[in-house]
Amino acid sequence: GAGVSQSPSNKVTEKGKDVELRCDPISGHTALYWYRQSLGQGLEFLIYFQGNSAPDKSGLPSDRFSAERTGGSVSTLTIQRTQQEDSAVYLCASSLVGGRAGGELFFGEGSRLTVL
Amino acid sequence: SQKIEQNSEALNIQEGKTATLTCNYTNYSPAYLQWYRQDPGRGPVFLLLIRENEKEKRKERLKVTFDTTLKQSLFHITASQPADSATYLCALDSTGGFKTIFGAGTRLFVKA
């Protein structure tokens, strides 16, 4: 597809389970971002990948959160031992360029996670 | 600490009027600032980008200003329409310039 694709669009899980959220960025985009948005709130930065550089993980809220980006393309955000406070919409975005070059971000529609 | 502030109160205006939204930041020296629109249940959509050496940028009914002395950007929608009702987010590159950080957004309601 032409846009950023995220899956699943909705995920309901039980507390303590692990979840994986997937992001397919736009082909050729070197920068990939994960954000979290709780109900009625703004976007909370989680992690940023830029090309082959080490990712900026400074926004990950705990060591239960991890992300990887394989082959400079698809990214997976993993949340281990989910807690109720992890419930949110997880948004992925990609950009042709990152850093101070200032590329516009293209967002997916998000993965809504509900932890019961 | 670094902060991006947008008015958390919703802005209600009458159709046809100009909507003005504010984005203030502290402890940043951004190379650029962006504005996005977000509709309920959707991902944000890019609207405009303005660089630090630009004072103003326009696109159709949208206008953005960037004052690096005041550390403020203003986002204007002229001749507003009910279809402009959405949440508007400002974003800028973080200190160090390696990631894009968002404000909390301002909800705009345009009444017919």
Image: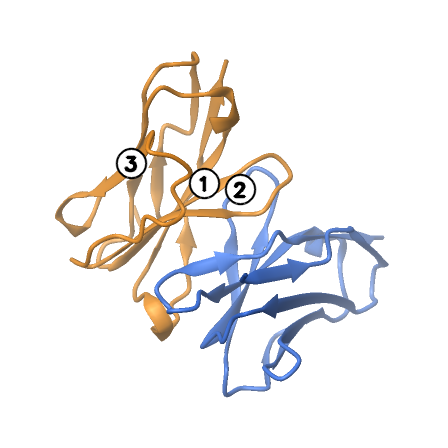
Chain colours: A orange, B blue
Q: Chain of mark 2?
A: B
Q: Specify the quadrant that holds the N terminus of chain B.
A: bottom right
In the picture of the structure, the residue carrying the numbered disc 2 is: B42
Q: Give the amino acid type for the residue marked by disc 2 in the picture.
A: Arg
Measuring 59% from the left and 61% from the top, which residue is drawn there? B4
Circles 2 and 1, Cβ within 8 Å, touching? The answer is yes
Q: Chain of mark 3?
A: A
Above-or-below relation of A108 to B112: above
**Residue A109, label in figure:** 1
Measuring 40% from the left and 47% from the top, which residue is drawn there? A59
**Residue B61, label in figure:** none
Depth order, front residue of B82/B22: B22
Q: Chain of mark 1?
A: A
In the picture of the structure, the residue carrying the numbered disc 3 is: A66
Q: Give neighbour class at mark 3: few <14, some 14-19, many 20+ (Cα, 10 Å).
A: some
Depth order, front residue of B34/A54: A54
Depth order, front residue of B103/B56: B103
Image location (x, y in percent) of residue B76: 70, 71
Whole-number angstrom distance, CA of label 3 to CA of label 2: 24 Å
Q: Is residue B1 left or right of residue B15?
A: left
Image location (x, y in percent) of residue B28: 51, 71
Measuring 56% from the left and 37% from the top, which residue is drawn there? B41
Element carrying mark 1: loop
Image location (x, y in percent) of residue B70: 66, 80
